[in-house]
Structure formats: structure tokens, C-alpha cells
Amino acid sequence: MNVGNVLQTWYGKNRRDLPWRNTGNAYHIWVSEIILQQTRVSQGISYYHRFLKKFPRLEDLARARPDEVMHVWKGLGYYSRARNMHVTAIRILNEYEGKFPSGYENILRLRGIGPYTAAAIASFAFNEPVPVVDGNVYRFLARLFGIVHPVGTAAGKKAVTEKAGKVMNRKNPALHNQAIMEFGALQCTPFRPPCHACPFRKDCLAYITGRVNDLPVKQKKPASEERYFNYVLLTGQLDMLLKKREKQDIWKGLYEFPLFESTSQIEPGQLTGNEWWKRLEKRTGPLHLKYHSGIITHILSHRKIRAVFYHAETRDSLPALQPGETTVSVTNWESIAFPVLIDKFLSQYLPLFLNGSI
DNA sequence: GAATCGTGGCG
DNA sequence: TCGCCAAGATT
């Protein structure tokens, strides 16, 4: 049997109608592929529309300010994707006159585009015969051919890519690649796949040998470590003080409040008694601590953030700004690209603060 | 090769 | 509550 033909037939009956499948625009396809990296389709769809409404053409993205790009990406996670897209848009505007380049090797050189995304764009937008290997394809082919190399290893990647190239329908790479990914997403699912309804049931090595639940092999992840973030919402009049995160760390490019990070949980007295707080008050003058939240746990993929929010008011207005700092009105905070942790806090806390119940 | 980088949904 | 997962790339 011909794997490619079976996939194509299956795809004709089972494909979802997704917005980025109705375009040949390389820019649109690029946007969709970056958004969908490590992200569910259901979560990505609204961001796809929002992103293209804000930046209809590659040139619009290239000419935008970094803060604008981050604001559109706010809440989607993996923010390096947005920063890299911006860099790449500028480069394409300069080097390719704003026209997205074709050719797998050319595409692969662009920042934020690795082997999968380059293959996806090359095949979807330019119909180039390069096999895509994403998580869906890896899972499907690992099961079908009984590939036991763990996900993420070079050997596994090589073995699966080789198989993907062999089963590819070279007459219509764009359609084929969509089909094989869709098959992994909808039929050859990670958890309890409906093998009874699978067209490859008789040929699937994992199914035949009863190892569907054991493939693909995954290596266990290291335990997630805890970090303790003590945030100070600092207001003077109706402005609050913000600082952009610029270090190589989580949430780079997003804004936050003055932060004291500790290695363990601390009490309010330990915050207002420490050197960091004293330096803060040296800038602001005496602070009135009017509120502190309980511990709020924010889970990242391999970190646990234990956060406490403090609200301190200055006697008068906020101090002069230092580099990387800015202010925003408490009624205009949604114009700022905050991480979800802070976004959630503000959406709950500010209404209470503004109507005087805190 | 291993660690890092977010968020939301699900069992 | 928690681990796993979802169209990966970078360092």
C-alpha cells in the first residue's frame, strides 16, 4: 500500500477548515507556523487573526515598534517567537525587498525558523518537496515503523525524517504535508488513539505488536524548580511604575512591576525590612504598604513561580524614571504587554482599588 | 545533548 | 493537584 495515497484520501474526508489553509500567501503561512509552534490550534486561531489585522503585510510588521509586536503576542507564550519574527521581517524587507524568500535552505537561515518551520513554509507556500517533521508526524511515523529513538534525539529525528521523505507524495508536497500532520493530530493522537478506525491498522508496527501506548518514546523531563517573585505595584497618583524585562530569562521583552526575587517564601516584614526595599524608598520616599496578596502560583513548562503582589503608594508622584522603566495610567494598563501572571492580577485587583474597596 | 522558553486544556 | 501535552527553536 502507498502511505501517501492513503493519507491523501483520509485527508479529503477528515480535514479541518483552518484559516491558514485558505491562502498561498507566504507571509500569512509564516505567521501561522510561528504561532503554532508548541501551541494548540484552538489557542492559535484568534492570535492568527489578531496578528494579521494588526500587521496585514510583512512590511507593516517590519516597521512596527518592538512593544507593539509584543503586545499582539501577549498571552501566547514563548515570546522569543515574536521577537524573532520582528527581526526576520526587518531582514526580509531589507534583503528580499519585503518578499518572503522561497527555497528551503534560504528559509532555514532566517531567525526563529528551524527545520520544521522551513519545511512547512517551503512546501505550503512554494510547493517544494521537503518533508515536514513536527510532533504529529514524529508520533505517526514512530508508531507506523516502530521507531524507538526517543523524541528529541538526533538519531530519532534522522530516522523519522528519512521515513517522511520516503512516504512523501512528490506530486503535491503541500497537500501531502498538510495531510500527514493532520493525520497525526486527529487520528494518530498521543492519548488513546482510535486505532480501530485507522486505515494503517494492518501495517502499523506499533499496533501489530501492541506498543501504541509506548511510542513514541519520550525521555522524562527534569523536575520543575520554584522561583519566588515578590512584585510591588507602585502607584503615585494614578500612575504605576513598570520595568521592561531585558535579561536572558522568562518573559524577555514584557513589562513587570519592581521585582524582588527570593530563593524562598518571604513574609511582608522581610520585604519591607530588606535592603532592596530601602533602596526603593530612597527613590520614592516613604511608602505606604496598603495591600499584599496571598501566594499566587503560576506554572510554566519547567518552572513554578510563587508570586506575591504588594501594593505600595508613594506620598506624591512617582520618582524620575531609570533606563528601561516607564509608567502607565491605572486605567490604561491593557495597552502594556504584561505576562499572564500580572495581567490576571491587574484585572482582578485594579477594579477593587479604583472603586475604593481596597 | 541538555536546558530553556509560556500558556491553557485535559484526564 | 499534577503531569502531560501542543504545527519547535535557540543556546
Image (cartoon, coloured by chain):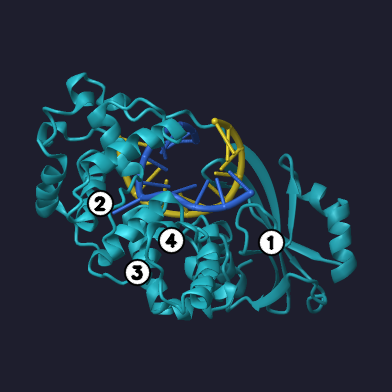
Chain colours: A cyan, B yellow, C blue
CB atoms of marks 1 and 4 within 8 Å? no
Above or below, A260 against A2 in this view is below
Q: Chain of mark 3?
A: A
* Mark whose residue sits in front, 1 or 2: 2
Mark 4 and mark 3 on one chain: yes
Q: How crowded is the residue under tag 1: few (<14 C-alpha within 10 Å), some, or many (20+)?
A: few
Residue bearing the label numbered 1 = A246
Instruction: Indicate the position of residue A112 as horizontal and vertical percent values.
Output: 50, 58
Instruction: Indicate the position of residue B1 as horizontal and vertical percent values.
Output: 54, 30
Instruction: Report how far apart the C-alphas of labels 1 and 4 lie in the structure.
Output: 28 Å
Camera sees residue A153: no
Above or below, A220 against A82 in this view is above
N-terminal of the pair, mark 2 or mark 3, is 3
Mark 1 and mark 4 on one chain: yes
The amino acid type of the residue labelled 4 equals Ile
N-terminal of the pair, mark 2 or mark 4, is 4
Q: Indicate which disc residue A107 carries.
A: 4
CB atoms of marks 2 and 4 within 8 Å? no
N-terminal of the pair, mark 3 or mark 1, is 3
* Mark whose residue sits in front, 1 or 4: 4
Q: Residue at x 16, y 44 (%)?
A: A4
Q: Indicate which disc residue A336 carries.
A: none
* Mark whose residue sits in front, 2 or 4: 4
Mark 3 and mark 1 on one chain: yes
Q: Indicate which disc residue A177 carries.
A: 2
Residue bearing the label numbered 3 = A26
Above or below, A185 against C1 in this view is below
N-terminal of the pair, mark 1 or mark 4, is 4
